[in-house]
Amino acid sequence: MKNDIDGLGSGTASWLFVLVVIGFVGTPTSLDAQEARDMAVIGSIDAVVDGAERQWLTIAGEVDGEFMHSAAWLPNVMPANPMAEMIENMPDAQREQMQAQMDAMSELMGDDSPYAQMFGEGAADQLRLRIMGVDPNSERILREGMLSIELASFSAKDIDALIGTPQEAEVSLFKNFGEQTGLHVSSHDMGLDATVLFDRLEIEPGGGAAEGLFEANLCPLSVVMGRDGDEDDCILITGSFASELGEEAPGEL
Protein backbone atom coordinates (compact mmCIF):
# COMPACT_ATOMS: atom_id res chain seq x y z
CA MET A 1 0.00 0.00 0.00
CA LYS A 2 3.01 2.29 0.23
CA ASN A 3 3.06 4.85 -2.58
CA ASP A 4 3.88 8.53 -2.92
CA ILE A 5 1.12 11.06 -2.30
CA ASP A 6 0.45 12.39 -5.79
CA GLY A 7 -3.00 13.82 -5.11
CA LEU A 8 -2.08 16.41 -2.50
CA GLY A 9 -1.82 19.46 -4.76
CA SER A 10 -3.85 22.59 -4.79
CA GLY A 11 -16.48 8.18 28.04
CA THR A 12 -14.54 10.12 30.43
CA ALA A 13 -13.29 13.14 28.58
CA SER A 14 -9.61 12.56 27.86
CA TRP A 15 -8.29 16.03 28.57
CA LEU A 16 -4.72 14.81 28.27
CA PHE A 17 -5.55 13.46 24.82
CA VAL A 18 -7.08 16.77 23.75
CA LEU A 19 -4.21 18.84 25.10
CA VAL A 20 -1.64 16.62 23.39
CA VAL A 21 -3.41 17.08 20.07
CA ILE A 22 -3.66 20.84 20.60
CA GLY A 23 0.04 21.01 21.41
CA PHE A 24 0.88 18.89 18.40
CA VAL A 25 -1.10 21.09 16.04
CA GLY A 26 0.26 24.26 17.60
CA THR A 27 3.86 23.15 17.11
CA PRO A 28 5.46 25.05 14.23
CA THR A 29 6.23 22.79 11.29
CA SER A 30 7.31 23.39 7.72
CA LEU A 31 5.28 20.46 6.40
CA ASP A 32 2.73 21.68 3.86
CA ALA A 33 0.84 19.90 1.08
CA GLN A 34 3.66 20.29 -1.42
CA GLU A 35 6.31 18.80 0.88
CA ALA A 36 3.93 15.97 1.80
CA ARG A 37 4.32 14.61 -1.73
CA ASP A 38 7.52 12.92 -0.53
CA MET A 39 5.74 11.06 2.26
CA ALA A 40 4.33 7.56 1.90
CA VAL A 41 0.64 6.78 2.16
CA ILE A 42 0.17 3.88 4.58
CA GLY A 43 -3.62 3.85 4.78
CA SER A 44 -6.83 5.83 4.77
CA ILE A 45 -9.87 6.77 6.83
CA ASP A 46 -13.22 7.17 5.09
CA ALA A 47 -16.17 8.66 6.93
CA VAL A 48 -19.41 10.56 6.75
CA VAL A 49 -19.14 13.74 8.84
CA ASP A 50 -22.34 15.62 9.56
CA GLY A 51 -23.80 14.12 6.37
CA ALA A 52 -20.77 14.83 4.15
CA GLU A 53 -18.40 12.15 2.80
CA ARG A 54 -14.74 12.81 3.61
CA GLN A 55 -11.42 10.98 3.34
CA TRP A 56 -8.16 11.27 5.28
CA LEU A 57 -4.79 9.62 4.62
CA THR A 58 -2.42 8.05 7.12
CA ILE A 59 1.15 8.83 6.19
CA ALA A 60 4.76 8.12 7.12
CA GLY A 61 7.89 10.12 6.45
CA GLU A 62 10.27 12.74 7.76
CA VAL A 63 8.96 15.81 9.57
CA ASP A 64 11.53 18.43 10.57
CA GLY A 65 14.28 15.82 10.64
CA GLU A 66 12.31 13.16 12.54
CA PHE A 67 10.66 10.10 10.97
CA MET A 68 7.02 9.73 11.97
CA HIS A 69 3.98 7.56 11.36
CA SER A 70 0.58 9.20 11.68
CA ALA A 71 -0.84 5.75 12.58
CA ALA A 72 1.23 4.07 15.25
CA TRP A 73 1.39 2.17 18.52
CA LEU A 74 3.76 2.61 21.47
CA PRO A 75 4.32 1.21 24.95
CA ASN A 76 2.19 2.94 27.58
CA VAL A 77 4.89 4.07 29.99
CA MET A 78 3.73 4.86 33.52
CA PRO A 79 4.85 8.21 34.99
CA ALA A 80 7.51 8.32 37.69
CA ASN A 81 6.12 6.72 40.84
CA PRO A 82 6.98 8.51 44.12
CA MET A 83 5.92 5.45 46.15
CA ALA A 84 8.31 3.23 44.24
CA GLU A 85 11.08 5.78 44.79
CA MET A 86 10.28 5.86 48.51
CA ILE A 87 10.58 2.06 48.73
CA GLU A 88 13.84 2.17 46.78
CA ASN A 89 15.31 4.55 49.40
CA MET A 90 14.36 2.38 52.38
CA PRO A 91 16.96 0.34 54.28
CA ASP A 92 17.46 -3.08 52.68
CA ALA A 93 15.55 -5.11 55.30
CA GLN A 94 12.59 -2.70 55.37
CA ARG A 95 12.50 -2.47 51.57
CA GLU A 96 12.47 -6.26 51.15
CA GLN A 97 9.70 -6.61 53.72
CA MET A 98 7.57 -3.90 52.07
CA GLN A 99 8.15 -5.33 48.60
CA ALA A 100 7.15 -8.80 49.73
CA GLN A 101 3.92 -7.44 51.20
CA MET A 102 3.07 -5.52 48.03
CA ASP A 103 3.88 -8.51 45.81
CA ALA A 104 1.53 -10.65 47.89
CA MET A 105 -1.26 -8.06 47.61
CA SER A 106 -0.79 -7.70 43.86
CA GLU A 107 -0.83 -11.45 43.33
CA LEU A 108 -3.96 -11.80 45.44
CA MET A 109 -5.88 -8.94 43.79
CA GLY A 110 -4.56 -9.22 40.24
CA ASP A 111 -2.86 -6.83 37.83
CA ASP A 112 -5.84 -4.45 37.80
CA SER A 113 -5.73 -3.84 41.52
CA PRO A 114 -4.89 -0.36 42.86
CA TYR A 115 -1.80 -1.84 44.52
CA ALA A 116 -0.49 -3.24 41.26
CA GLN A 117 -1.14 0.05 39.45
CA MET A 118 0.35 2.08 42.30
CA PHE A 119 3.66 0.27 42.04
CA GLY A 120 3.70 -0.08 38.27
CA GLU A 121 3.02 -3.79 38.20
CA GLY A 122 1.15 -5.06 35.16
CA ALA A 123 1.94 -1.92 33.18
CA ALA A 124 4.86 -3.33 31.23
CA ASP A 125 2.72 -4.89 28.51
CA GLN A 126 0.29 -1.96 28.16
CA LEU A 127 0.09 -0.32 24.73
CA ARG A 128 -1.48 2.76 23.22
CA LEU A 129 -2.74 3.14 19.66
CA ARG A 130 -3.41 6.22 17.57
CA ILE A 131 -4.68 6.35 14.00
CA MET A 132 -4.39 9.90 12.71
CA GLY A 133 -5.38 10.89 9.19
CA VAL A 134 -4.49 14.10 7.38
CA ASP A 135 -6.73 15.98 4.98
CA PRO A 136 -5.02 15.81 1.57
CA ASN A 137 -6.68 19.07 0.53
CA SER A 138 -5.38 21.14 3.45
CA GLU A 139 -2.69 23.72 2.86
CA ARG A 140 -0.92 22.63 6.07
CA ILE A 141 -1.81 19.01 6.63
CA LEU A 142 -0.46 18.78 10.18
CA ARG A 143 -2.30 21.90 11.33
CA GLU A 144 -5.68 21.74 9.59
CA GLY A 145 -8.27 19.05 9.02
CA MET A 146 -6.68 16.23 11.02
CA LEU A 147 -8.82 13.34 12.28
CA SER A 148 -7.41 11.33 15.18
CA ILE A 149 -8.70 8.10 16.72
CA GLU A 150 -7.00 7.01 19.93
CA LEU A 151 -7.67 3.78 21.77
CA ALA A 152 -7.46 3.58 25.55
CA SER A 153 -4.40 1.71 26.82
CA PHE A 154 -4.72 -2.04 26.44
CA SER A 155 -2.72 -5.16 27.20
CA ALA A 156 -0.64 -6.76 24.49
CA LYS A 157 -2.04 -10.09 25.71
CA ASP A 158 -5.60 -8.98 24.90
CA ILE A 159 -5.19 -7.99 21.25
CA ASP A 160 -7.17 -10.96 19.91
CA ALA A 161 -9.98 -10.22 22.36
CA LEU A 162 -10.29 -6.67 21.02
CA ILE A 163 -11.27 -7.83 17.55
CA GLY A 164 -15.00 -7.86 16.89
CA THR A 165 -15.93 -6.18 20.19
CA PRO A 166 -16.66 -2.42 20.42
CA GLN A 167 -13.88 -0.57 22.24
CA GLU A 168 -14.05 2.84 23.90
CA ALA A 169 -11.98 5.42 22.07
CA GLU A 170 -11.27 9.15 21.93
CA VAL A 171 -11.82 10.90 18.61
CA SER A 172 -10.90 14.45 17.63
CA LEU A 173 -11.37 16.36 14.40
CA PHE A 174 -9.91 19.72 13.39
CA LYS A 175 -12.95 20.51 11.26
CA ASN A 176 -11.97 22.80 8.39
CA PHE A 177 -15.16 22.69 6.31
CA GLY A 178 -18.80 23.73 6.65
CA GLU A 179 -20.06 25.55 9.73
CA GLN A 180 -18.57 25.47 13.22
CA THR A 181 -14.97 24.86 12.17
CA GLY A 182 -12.23 24.15 14.69
CA LEU A 183 -11.44 21.40 17.18
CA HIS A 184 -14.28 18.93 17.81
CA VAL A 185 -13.82 16.17 20.39
CA SER A 186 -15.64 13.23 21.90
CA SER A 187 -16.61 13.45 25.56
CA HIS A 188 -17.84 10.43 27.48
CA ASP A 189 -18.79 12.71 30.37
CA MET A 190 -21.36 14.36 28.10
CA GLY A 191 -22.59 11.07 26.69
CA LEU A 192 -20.71 11.73 23.46
CA ASP A 193 -19.45 8.19 23.09
CA ALA A 194 -16.80 7.18 20.60
CA THR A 195 -16.20 3.52 19.77
CA VAL A 196 -13.96 1.47 17.52
CA LEU A 197 -14.71 -2.01 16.17
CA PHE A 198 -11.60 -3.78 14.90
CA ASP A 199 -11.78 -6.28 12.06
CA ARG A 200 -8.01 -6.66 12.18
CA LEU A 201 -5.36 -5.55 14.64
CA GLU A 202 -1.75 -6.66 14.38
CA ILE A 203 0.97 -5.37 16.69
CA GLU A 204 4.53 -6.50 16.05
CA PRO A 205 8.03 -5.09 16.56
CA GLY A 206 8.46 -2.20 14.16
CA GLY A 207 4.85 -1.88 13.09
CA GLY A 208 1.63 -3.74 12.39
CA ALA A 209 -1.77 -3.06 10.82
CA ALA A 210 -5.29 -2.05 11.82
CA GLU A 211 -8.64 -2.20 10.05
CA GLY A 212 -12.12 -1.55 11.35
CA LEU A 213 -15.05 0.77 11.89
CA PHE A 214 -15.59 3.73 14.19
CA GLU A 215 -18.36 6.04 15.31
CA ALA A 216 -18.31 9.16 17.43
CA ASN A 217 -20.39 12.14 18.48
CA LEU A 218 -18.15 15.20 18.44
CA CYS A 219 -18.71 18.62 19.96
CA PRO A 220 -16.67 21.82 19.64
CA LEU A 221 -14.10 21.96 22.42
CA SER A 222 -15.73 25.14 23.75
CA VAL A 223 -18.99 23.24 24.26
CA VAL A 224 -17.28 20.30 25.98
CA MET A 225 -15.48 22.69 28.32
CA GLY A 226 -18.73 24.57 29.02
CA ARG A 227 -17.50 27.91 27.70
CA ASP A 228 -20.01 28.67 24.95
CA GLY A 229 -22.12 27.11 22.22
CA ASP A 230 -24.62 24.30 22.65
CA GLU A 231 -25.07 20.67 21.74
CA ASP A 232 -26.80 21.64 18.49
CA ASP A 233 -23.27 22.39 17.28
CA CYS A 234 -22.24 18.74 17.79
CA ILE A 235 -21.80 16.40 14.82
CA LEU A 236 -21.92 12.67 14.14
CA ILE A 237 -19.06 10.91 12.36
CA THR A 238 -19.14 7.27 11.22
CA GLY A 239 -16.61 5.51 9.06
CA SER A 240 -13.91 2.93 8.47
CA PHE A 241 -10.13 2.81 8.54
CA ALA A 242 -7.40 0.57 7.12
CA SER A 243 -3.77 1.39 7.74
CA GLU A 244 -0.33 0.05 8.35
CA LEU A 245 1.03 1.00 11.77
CA GLY A 246 4.40 2.28 12.81
CA GLU A 247 6.05 1.76 16.19
CA GLU A 248 6.88 4.93 18.09
CA ALA A 249 9.18 5.31 21.04
CA PRO A 250 7.60 5.91 24.48
CA GLY A 251 6.47 9.50 24.83
CA GLU A 252 6.39 10.23 21.09
CA LEU A 253 2.79 9.36 20.27
Image (cartoon, rainbow, N blue to C red):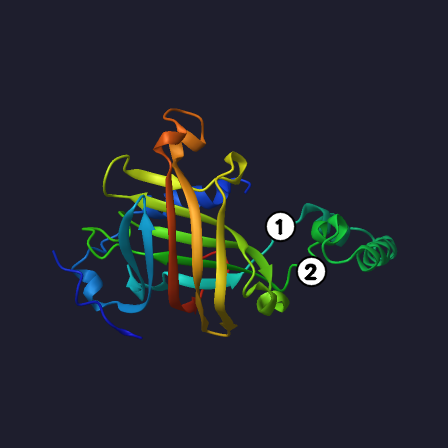
View extreme (top): residue: 228
Disc sitting over residue 122 in the figure: 2
Q: Give the spatial CA distance, label 1 vs label 2.
A: 15 Å
Determine the residue positioned at 39% across, 27% down: 230
- Local packing at callout 2 (Cα closer than 10 Å; few below 14, some 14-19, many 20+) is some
**Snapshot quadrant of residue 246:** bottom left
Determine the residue positioned at 82% across, 56% down: 99
Residue 132 visible to an observer of this rendering: yes
Residue 249 visible to an observer of this rendering: no
Ranked by sequence position, the earlier of labels 1 and 2 is: 1
Name the residue beneath numbered marker 1.
Answer: 80
Relative to 73, residue 223 above or below: above
Amino acid at the residue labelled 1: Ala
Determine the residue positioned at 74% across, 54% down: 116
From the top left corner, tell me how far across and down residue 28 is, in percent: 28, 47
Asked whether, in this view, residue 1 is left or right of residue 246, the answer is left
